[in-house]
Image (cartoon, rainbow, N blue to C red):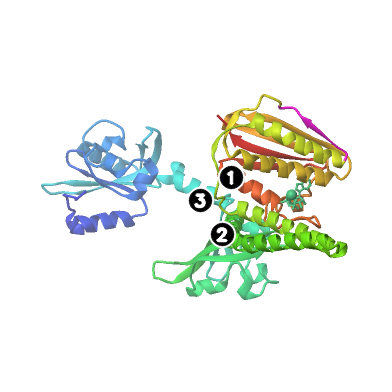
Amino acid sequence: MEAAYSLQLLGSPKRLQQYMRQLPNAVLLVDRTGMIVEVNEILLRATGFAREELIGRPFRLIVPGKGTIRQFYEQMLEKEEQNSLPVELEWRNKQGKSGTSSAMVLVQESEDTLYMVHLFQLGREQGYPLAQRFFQRLGNDNSLGFIMIDAKGDIVEINQLACRVLGVEKITVLNRNLDDVFARVPESHRLIQRDLLTGVKQQNNAMYWSNNNQRFELLVDSGTLQDASGQTVGGYILFKDITNLRSIEQKIERNERLAMIGQIAAGTAHEIRNPLTSIKGFLQMFSQLFEDIGMAREKSYTEIMLTEINRINSLVNEFLLLSKPRDVQYSMVDLNTVFEELLPIVESQGLLHGIDVKYSSRGVLPTVVGDAELLKQVFLNICKNGIEAMGNEGTIHISHHFETDSNRLSIDIHDSGPGIPPYVIDKIFDPFYTTKEEGTGLGLAVCQKIIHDIGGQIRVSSKGYGTTFHILLPYM
Ligand SMILES: Nc1ncnc2c1ncn2[C@@H]1O[C@H](COP(=O)(O)OP(=O)(O)O)[C@@H](O)[C@H]1O
Ligand SMILES: [Mg+2]
């Protein structure tokens, strides 16, 4: 808003505004009709008004009472003469709450008379409520840390996160010198360095910091504080604790790596499978030939070679599933049918190992969108893992429940095996992670890919004894 007034003493309106801004107390400038023409920031902070809510409005908004500005001015003068300076005055904030303050009115007499109303120590009670609260809040902040030092290098302010990162109590470091506090840390490794007073600035500087029992990853900014004459009087660092962010980053990195493995697999799997097919064909010929001419030993070698080739083939097949499957047929899949076809396979495998298979979802499962063959492979893989984990006795229990809030079905496959130790559980979905001598480590990686592709999710819970895999699927 362009100011259309002037105080001769101060020349231009701009200069007047500048002057008001520099004043350490609240000021409002009022024209002879009693309307406010200018205010300063201190007044705004203390009263809670925005400038626009005051300009062009009656000064009585701030100074309650009756009478014109002229009358107000004359009453003030009278009181000043009766008492010693300054006069106490009632004022109101935006909420209409009253406070008292000492006040003085200066006047510029001309055809456009201006009254400058000074309110002293207005902030006494109400203060800078928001700014103060903000600072207090920062003091207790758990994600933003700061440390402030003076020109001597004494710590003059430090907040809670900074204390936690340093592993100290605020009371033990306040007003103590950096050299003292970081006595055992080499200068260049200190979280906050004296260097910063010489103007060595940092911005978004990622650094590690560990105290005795915790390791932090921080993003640090620093700067200096100058007084009016430009002299450096202190410095500060501000930092954000990004330890969590880093672990998300690592997860993304891992996913990217997975995607790359998938791409490589897609590119090479066929190149491996084609030559294997011809090797297999010739071996089968040899096998027949050896049999015909009665070379039993040689025939048994070819049999071994053929089983090994089959192993490579199934490995390559898993590889292919890990990459973008080519011939996926998404359709409505009745899970009841899937399990009816699957159960005999699981049961026969269980029988081999003395393991019971319980199925308690017969006939009640909903329809999902997916590829029936791939889904079968997921459930089979997970059951197989369970059977392999249990050794020679135990139970596989297949059941389900609904997660109503996310509209998903959960197929729950429980085994009574030894469970998965916490340090392993993070890695079981990684390709090639296996704890088995003959394992490929691809089973769960493939399962996860298949389920993710249809908008589902696999969760594992393994508390002490037994493991449950929850396969969550959106359903119709
Ligand atoms: N039900 C389970 N109980 C205990 N450990 C399991 C279970 N399922 C998976 N695991 C662990 O996860 C690892 C990875 O499984 P997977 O990806 O299927 O590969 P593989 O079966 O070839 O080892 C297994 O080697 C095993 O350590
Ligand atoms: Mg497996």
Query: Which residue in the protein does label 1 denote?
Result: 452
Q: Any magenta on residue 53? A: no
- Measured from the top left, where is residue 43 in percent x and y? 34, 46
Residue 59 at x, y percent in the picture: 26, 38
Q: Residues within 10 Å of mark 1 (few under 14, many from 20)?
A: some
The first of marks 1 and 3 along the sequence is 3
> In this orientation, which residue lies closer to the viewer: 181 or 329?
329
* 359 part of magenta stretch: yes
Which residue has dot 2 on it?
Answer: 263
Residue, x 18% and y 58% (percent of image)? 12
**Residue extending furthest toward the top:** 364
Kindly state the secondary structure of the residue where label 1 is placed. helix
Picture quarter containing residue 379? top right
Pick the quarter of the image with the C terminus: top right
Considering the whole magenta stretch, tell me its main secondary structure. Answer: strand
Magenta-highlighted residues: 354-361
User: Residue 282 appears at what percent x and percent y?
Assistant: 70, 63
Q: Is mark 1 within 8 Å of ligand 1?
A: no
Q: What kind of residue is marked 1?
A: His
Residue 131 versus residue 448: which sits nearer the camera? 448
Q: Amino acid at mark 2?
A: Gln
Q: Residue furthest front?
A: 293
Residue placed most toward the observer, 390 or 242: 390
Query: As shown in the figure, which amino acid type bears the numbered disc 3?
Result: Phe
**Alpha carbon distance from label 1 to label 2:** 17 Å
For mark 3, does the 10 Å Cα neighbourhood hold few (<14), some (14 to 19), or many (20 or more) residues?
few
Specify whether tag 2 is near ligand 1 (CB below 8 Å): no
Of helix, strand and loop, which one carries label 2?
helix
What's the residue at 47%, 73% (across, down)? 199
Residue where numbered disc 3 is placed: 135
Q: Nearer the viewer, mark 1 or mark 3?
A: 1
Which one is earlier in the sequence, the residue at label 3 or at label 2?
Answer: 3
